[in-house]
Every structure is written in structure tokens, then in C-alpha cells.
């Protein structure tokens, strides 16, 4: 029995996001304390390098329509795989702030293109009954990348910072090969995506875009400072921070697929509000109660954050239909890029000025709570579609 085309595409999407998002973006978090302690960058420089990565994501979302008009989806995604892999390889060389900031920025650009195109391909190809499962498989790749980085980085740091970057690049090569295979069915399209056609904008679309922007702000504290908070803020060391990052990966792998399964059963609208509320609790918790149990809970809950992308992507397809899904998803990715760029630079500056992690994480939790509130009208006003 041959593998369904949608499943092969979903596996390709998972491997793509494993390389671009899981390794290219989130592997920086467990590396941050070592980068500072080794003197490769100052604490301020290391934070701003993370912010450059978030800014690249915004640029990638802006240029995606131009790229999609010029190139077919599969060649474009494969080009992004090569760019992301090159960024990991070039990060091995300790050539200072400008060098690392450039490569972190460039991988951010590639990740946005990957996110828009891979998710759009899979969401359109998946039959309605397995939409949650298909998008869940795609975002599970982010969790696997986080899990690898959390498990491998602390061990490799025992050798050197260079060894840690090299190990991530080696894992990236394997994921690139899997992704290359996974996009095989998409290669049959053979032509660039259709020209841009503006979808109908209604209240549901606006709230989806705004909620996704709030989600991106809520991700910033953990994305940049989680391991650093544990290692230096709580004085527990890099090993303890790395162990928590492994739990982030566990939460991402398990939580993402579970959210897709849940959305297929209780409705994407209800699931979206639920996931937002749980994330709001998990992001703010560790600076309110920094007990071991609270740290573990926060790692697992934050790890499951790709679950929200799984659910909100499925909800977007329900609201606008498969034809307009790629265009609305791009708006949502743009909202993420804008939100995380503003929050990235803003929260890094806030931390550098105050020296405190508490306001950074509380702002992140408040943004997730705002996303939950924005999500409420989706299923209140459109009860029939939320369960579809």
C-alpha cells in the first residue's frame, strides 16, 4: 500500500521545520549561556543576535509572495533547506557579533518562507477528516528539532561551543535529506504558485491574524531567555538549562500531535482558545513560582507551543477555505514576524535595562492571554464551522 501524498508532504514539512525552526531558530536558546560565558558575545550582543533572527522572519514573510510568483513550491522549499543548512554550518566559525547576527537573520528569512509554503501545501492537500493530524505532523518537526538540540547541545558543549554548532549542522544534513524526499509529490506541480488574489477580509480573518501576532509575542521570552534564566538567573547551570530544554522538546513532540487530534474531535475554534489559555499560564508561571515543578510544567507547556500553530492553521482553512488559505496564512505569518520582531528587540532592551527576567516573562504570558480573548468570538459567532 503506497503512502498517501498528503502524508508524504506532511513528513516533508516536518523535516523542513525541524531544520529551519527546530534547529535553525530554537537551538540558539540552549547555546545562549555558553556563548556568553565563553566570551564569544556579551550578554547584550547575544540577546540582539536572537532578535536579528526574529527580524529575519518578518523579512521572509514579506518577500514570500515575490518568491512564490517566480518559483514552484518544491524548488523554493529545497532552496530554503540549503540556505538553512548553510547558516548552521557558517555559525560554527566564531567570527563575532556581525557574522553570527547575519547568519541568524538569514535563517530567519528562510524559516518564514518554509513556514508559509510547507504548511499551505499540506493544509490544502490534506482531506478534511485528517486536517488536524496532517498539520500536527508538520509542526511535530519543530518539537523534534528542539528535542535534539536540548539533548545534544549540553553534551557537545562539554567539548566546545564549536562542536555544538557542528553537531547541529550534522543533524540538519539528515533532516534536509528527509525533507528533500518528502517534497516529491509537490514537484509534480512544476509551475510557480498562482498569482496573488486578495481574499475576502472579515472579522474572523482579522481576529485570526491579531491572535497569531499575540502568540508570537508570547513566544519571545522562552525562545531567547528560557535556558539563560535557568542557568544564570536561577544559578542552576547550563546542564540544568539543557535538561529543561529537552523537556521543551518532549512537550513539542507530544503536545503538537495531541492538539491536532483534539481539534479534529472538539473543533478547531474551541481548541484554539484552550491552547492559548494553557500557554498563557505556562509562560508566566516560572517567574511567579520558580519551584522545580513549575519549571518542568513551564518547559512542557511552552514546548507544546507548535500546537497552537497546528490548530490556528486548521482554523484558518475552515474560515477562508483551501483556495484562500495560503494567502491568509501569509498574513498570519507576517503578524508573527512583526510581533516577534517588535517584542524581540523590545523585550531584549527591557531585560538589558532592568536586568530582570520577571517583566519579560509576564509580558509574554499577558500576550498569550490576549490571544485567548481574541479567539473567543471565532466560535461564538460561527458555531457551525468551529466543529468542522
Image: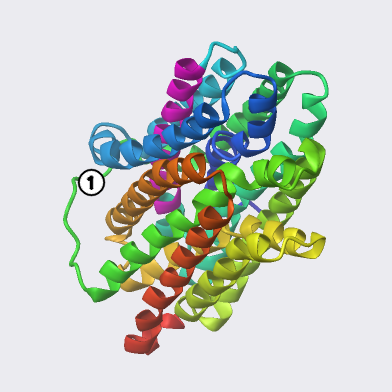
Most common SS among magenta residues: helix
Name the image quarter holding the N terminus: bottom right
Is disc 1 surrounded by few (<14), some (14 to 19) or many (20+) residues within 10 Å?
few
- 83 or 246: nearer the viewer: 246
Q: Name which quarter of the figure residue 361 lies in.
A: bottom right
Residue 6 visible, this orientation: no
Q: What stretch of residues is rendered in magenta?
A: 97-120
**Which quadrant would residue 214 be assigned to in this image?**
bottom left
Q: Secondary structure at mark 1?
A: loop
**Which quarter of the image is occupied by the C terminus?**
bottom left
Return the x and y of residue 26 as percentages of the image width and height: 59, 40
Q: Position of residue 146 (x, y in %)?
A: 66, 44
Q: Is residue 317 above or below residue 51?
A: below
In the image, residue 379 lies in the stretch drawn in magenta:
no
Identity of the residue drawn at 46% across and 83% down: 387
* Spot occupied by residue 301 in the image (x, y as percentages of width and height): 65, 63
**Residue visible at 50% across and 49% down in the picture:** 220
Q: Nearer the viewer, residue 383 or 242?
A: 242
Residue placed most toward the observer, 239 or 350:
350
Q: Is residue 295 left or right of residue 83?
A: right
Percent x, y of residue 358: 58, 56
Does the image show residue 199? yes
Q: Which residue is mark 1?
A: 194
Name the foreground residue: 341 vs 266.
341
Look at the image and say whether residue 107 sits in the magenta stretch: yes
* Residue beneath the point at 57% across and 62% down: 307
Count how many numbered circles sit on residues in the image. Answer: 1
Residue at 57% x, 49% y is 356
Left or right? Give the position of 383 relative to 71.
right
Q: Is residue 300 left or right of residue 302?
A: right
> Considering only vertical position in the picture, is 274 above or below 123?
below
Q: Is residue 274 left or right of residue 232?
A: left
Amino acid at each position: 500500500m503506497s503512502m498517501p501524498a498528503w502524508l508524504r508532504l506532511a513528513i516533508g514539512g516536518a523535516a523542513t521545520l525541524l531544520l529551519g525552526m527546530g534547529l535553525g531558530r530554537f537551538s540558539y536558546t540552549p547555546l545562549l549561556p555558553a556563548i556568553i560565558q565563553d566570551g564569544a558575545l556579551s550578554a547584550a550582543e547575544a540577546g540582539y543576535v536572537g532578535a536579528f533572527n526574529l527580524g529575519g522572519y518578518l523579512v521572509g514573510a514579506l518577500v514570500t509572495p515575490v518568491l512564490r510568483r517566480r518559483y514552484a513550491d518544491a524548488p523554493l522549499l529545497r532552496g530554503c533547506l540549503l540556505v538553512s543548512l548553510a547558516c548552521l554550518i557558517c555559525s560554527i566559525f566564531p567570527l563575532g557579533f556581525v557574522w553570527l547576527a547575519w547568519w541568524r537573520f538569514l535563517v530567519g528569512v528562510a524559516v518564514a518562507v518554509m513556514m508559509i509554503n510547507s504548511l499551505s501545501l499540506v493544509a490544502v492537500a490534506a482531506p478534511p477528516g485528517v486536517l488536524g493530524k496532517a498539520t500536527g505532523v508538520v509542526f511535530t518537526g519543530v518539537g523534534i528539532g528542539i528535542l535534539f538540540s536540548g539533548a545534544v547541545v549540553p553534551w557537545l558543549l562539554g567539548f566546545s561551543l564549536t562542536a555544538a554548532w557542528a553537531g547541529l549542522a550534522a543533524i540538519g544534513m539528515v533532516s534536509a535529506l528527509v525533507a528533500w524526499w518528502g517534497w516529491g509529490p509537490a514537484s509534480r506541480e512544476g509551475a510557480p504558485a498562482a498569482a496573488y488574489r486578495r481574499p475576502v477580509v472579515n472579522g474572523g480573518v482579522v481576529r485570526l491574524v491579531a491572535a497569531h501576532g499575540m502568540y508570537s509575542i508570547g513566544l519571545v521570552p522562552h525562545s531567547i531567555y528560557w535556558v539563560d534564566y535557568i542557568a544564570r538567573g536561577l544559578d542552576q547551570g547550563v546542564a540544568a538549562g539543557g535538561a529543561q530544554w529537552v523537556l521543551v522538546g518532549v512537550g513539542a513532540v507530544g503536545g503538537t500531535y495531541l492538539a491536532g487530534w483534539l481539534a479534529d474531535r472538539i473543533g478547531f475554534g474551541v481548541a484554539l482558545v484552550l491552547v492559548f489559555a494553557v500557554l498563557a499560564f505556562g509562560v508566566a508561571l516560572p517567574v511567579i513560582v520558580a519551584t522545580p515543578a513549575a519549571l518542568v510544567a513551564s518547559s512542557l507547556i511552552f514546548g507544546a507551543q507548535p500546537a497552537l500553530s497546528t490548530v490556528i492553521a486548521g482554523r484558518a482553512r475552515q474560515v477562508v477555505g483551501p483556495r484562500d488559505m495560503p494567502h491568509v496564512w501569509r498574513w498570519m505569518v507576517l503578524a508573527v514576524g512583526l510581533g516577534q520582531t517588535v517584542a524581540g528587540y523590545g523585550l531584549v532592551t527591557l531585560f538589558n535595562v532592568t536586568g530582570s527576567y520577571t517583566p519579560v516573562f509576564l509580558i509574554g504570558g499577558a500576550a498569550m492571554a490576549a490571544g485567548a480573548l481574541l479567539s473567543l468570538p471565532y466560535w461564538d459567532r460561527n458555531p457551525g464551522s468551529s466543529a468542522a
